[in-house]
Image (tube, rainbow, N blue to C red):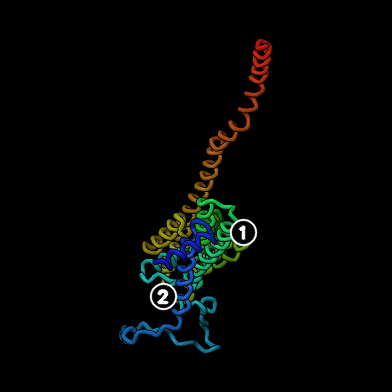
């Protein structure tokens, strides 16, 4: 007991009132690092191996160098941390995988890399914040609130920065798909009416719009390649709607599936839907134009009303001030 009190007094003398708390935090970080380093060297459970063999879920053997399908080398170094960096629930993993695909990251190790980056930034900035807090606490230039902000602020920033980046990439990609979809439908309609098949039209449109809308061109190209590989067109189109996450693409896929199911003309369906998309784009532009005056109202009030009040009331206030000042003597 006396030893603990002496250690506590020593820490408070060296790092301030929160010295014991900082020591406990540093010890926790050290234990986490040690745990991560010992995960790769941990022996596999024999019962788990037997269960995997019986269920047929063992990983594929490494392919030869001249194989057509190469392994994902980007996440190869993170394979040993897969149990720690990937959700174990299949539903959660599918949801995280879909979010990464919608952001434009299609690698198999995208979820693993994202979680590793999130953990590394959070822990790295936490250690950096602790070091800065210890330095400032030793110099006596920081309060308790400031100490907590220096410790927790960088850690939260490092943890949520990858999430913000993924959300921003998803929003930008969805906006790019929405803006380029009406033009792609018009080009697809021209190709179909010129005598090309639907698959050839999709491939041609993907080549033409790549310079302006690369995200939409990539989706069309994936659809073309999957159909050429022999995959069912309905499932390919549904997968495209899931990857894009845009309501217009979902409606377009529904139109194509219904046209193929009932045997109606694809050109007529594309013509009607392309006209609706053009009208919808005009309506979005008009909506933004109508909302603009409302958004400018607050800025106009803040920038014009105070100077106007100063011009109108300023001379009167100054005259009253002079009058009261003269009568005070």
Category of crowding for the residue at label 2, using alpha-carbon neighbours closer than 10 angstroms: few (below 14), some (14–19), many (at least 20) = few
Residue 141: % across, % down: 59, 52
Count the marks: how many?
2
Q: Quadrant of the N terminus?
A: bottom left
**Residue located at (36% from left, 67% from top):** 91
Residue 169: % across, % down: 54, 59
Residue 78: % across, % down: 49, 77
Residue pointed to by mark 2? 83
Camera-side residue of 295 and 253: 295
In this rendering, does residue 181 appear at all?
Answer: no
Q: Earlier in the sequence, mark 2 or mark 1?
A: 2
Residue pointed to by mark 1? 212
**Residue located at (38% from left, 84% from top):** 44
Residue 73: % across, % down: 54, 79
Q: Which mark is residue 203?
A: none
Camera-side residue of 64 and 6: 6
């Amino acid at each position: 007991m006396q030893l603990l009190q002496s250690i506590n007094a020593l820490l408070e003398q060296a790092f301030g009132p929160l010295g014991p708390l900082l020591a406990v935090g540093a010890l926790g970080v050290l234990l986490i690092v040690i745990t991560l380093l010992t995960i790769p060297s941990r022996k596999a459970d024999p019962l788990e191996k037997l269960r995997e063999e019986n269920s047929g879920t063992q990983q594929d053997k490494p392919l030869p160098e001249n194989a057509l399908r190469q392994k994902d080398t980007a996440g190869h170094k993170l394979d040993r941390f897969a149990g720690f960096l990937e959700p174990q629930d299949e539903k959660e993993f599918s949801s995280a995988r879909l979010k990464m695909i919608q952001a434009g990251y299609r690698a198999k190790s995208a979820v693993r890399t994202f979680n590793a980056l999130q953990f590394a930034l959070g822990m790295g900035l936490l250690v950096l914040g602790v070091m800065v807090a210890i330095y400032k606490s030793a110099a006596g230039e920081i309060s308790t609130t400031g100490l907590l902000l220096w410790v927790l602020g960088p850690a939260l920033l490092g943890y949520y920065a990858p999430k913000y980046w993924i959300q921003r990439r998803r929003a930008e990609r969805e906006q790019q798909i929405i803006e380029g979809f009406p033009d792609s439908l018009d080009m697809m309609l021209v190709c179909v009416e010129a005598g090309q098949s639907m698959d050839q039209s999709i491939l041609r449109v993907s080549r033409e719009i790549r310079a302006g809308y690369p995200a939409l061109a990539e989706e069309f190209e994936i659809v073309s390649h999957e159909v050429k590989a022999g995959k069912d067109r309905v499932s390919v189109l549904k997968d495209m709607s899931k990857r894009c996450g845009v309501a217009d693409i979902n409606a377009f896929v529904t139109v194509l599936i219904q046209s193929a199911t009932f045997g109606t003309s694809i050109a007529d369906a594309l013509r009607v839907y392309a006209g609706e998309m053009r009208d919808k784009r005009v309506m979005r532009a008009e909506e933004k134009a109508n909302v603009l005056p409302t958004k400018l109202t607050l800025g106009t009030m803040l920038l014009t009303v105070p100077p106007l009040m100063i011009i109108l009331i300023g001379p009167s206030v100054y005259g009253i001030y002079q009058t009261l000042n003269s009568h005070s003597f």
